[in-house]
Image (spheres, grey):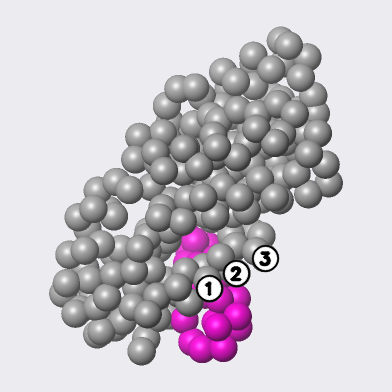
């Protein structure tokens, strides 16, 4: 059976390359070919098992993706949002790899629609010396939290983007933080363990 990673897609060609690179890593772990697809595609491989690479549960996950699956007669696997606990654990493991005594900020795209990931992070980040969750598009914002920590003399600060790939959101995050002294961690797909997590999502399906 065909297995597909379904990503949002972007006008930036580097996004497609990142998705394909992730698919290649997952293919190696599963020892079978993993295809890629994007929301803008007209159709998907017929009968494919499709895993949506979405951390939130907005309109795309609730409406757009099921419609796309229906037109191809495919099987919709639980989106990545359903693995929020594992995603949060991976992010925490990576950002505290050198020491748990770190001041860590986890940055989400926004809070609305990302409730599962927010809850998972709140349940696990207490292992850090100091921790915060912030958003690119809502409050508390990245800038407001960093300004508060700066006033308190909190340092060093490690910032973990809860974003899947490099792109416009990471560009925005870098512009928001350029005036602050922080250690910027990679996006989630930049970690080898992320591909292992995706592979496990496929393995968990009957």
Single out the mark in the foreground, 1 or 3. 1
For the record, the magenta segment spans 9-34
Are the residues at dot 1 and dot 3 in contact (C-beta closer than 8 Å)?
no
Q: Mark 1 to mark 2: distance in Å?
A: 5 Å
Q: Which mark is residue 192?
A: 3
Q: Which mark is residue 199?
A: 1
**Mark 2 Cα shell of 10 Å, populated few (<14), some (14-19), many (≥20):** some
Q: Eyeballing the image, is 141 above or below 35?
A: above
Quarter of the figure with residue 3:
bottom left
Q: Earlier in the sequence, mark 1 or mark 3?
A: 3
Residue 71 or 80: which is nearer the viewer? Answer: 80
Give the labeled residue for mark 2: 196
**Mark 1 Cα shell of 10 Å, populated few (<14), some (14-19), many (≥20):** some
Tell me if residue 157 can be seen: no
Q: In the rendering, at what x and y percent does residue 91 appear?
A: 63, 49
Q: Residue drawn at (72%, 45%), measured in percent from left and top?
A: 95
Q: In the rendering, at what x and y percent does residue 147 appear?
A: 64, 16
Report if residue 10 lies within the magenta region: yes
Q: Eyeballing the image, is 23 above or below 137?
A: below
């Amino acid at each position: 059976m065909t297995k597909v990673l379904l990503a949002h897609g972007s006008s930036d060609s580097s996004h497609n390359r990142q998705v394909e690179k992730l698919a290649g890593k997952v293919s190696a772990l599963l020892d079978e070919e993993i295809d890629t697809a994007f929301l803008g595609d007209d159709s998907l491989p017929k009968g494919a098992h499709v895993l949506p690479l979405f951390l939130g549960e907005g309109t795309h996950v609730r409406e757009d993706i099921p419609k796309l699956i229906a037109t191809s007669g495919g099987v919709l696997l639980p989106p990545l949002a359903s693995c929020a606990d594992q995603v949060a654990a991976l992010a925490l493991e990576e950002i505290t790899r050198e020491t748990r005594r770190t001041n860590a900020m986890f940055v989400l795209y926004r809070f609305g629609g990302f409730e599962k990931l927010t809850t998972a992070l709140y349940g696990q980040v207490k292992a850090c010396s100091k921790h915060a969750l912030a958003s690119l598009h809502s409050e508390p914002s990245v800038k407001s939290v960093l300004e508060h920590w700066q006033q308190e003399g909190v340092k060093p600060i490690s910032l973990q983007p809860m974003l899947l790939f490099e792109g416009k959101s990471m560009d925005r995050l870098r512009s928001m933080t350029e005036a602050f002294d922080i250690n910027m961690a990679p996006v989630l797909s930049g970690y080898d363990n992320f591909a292992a997590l995706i592979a496990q999502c496929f393995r968990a399906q009957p």
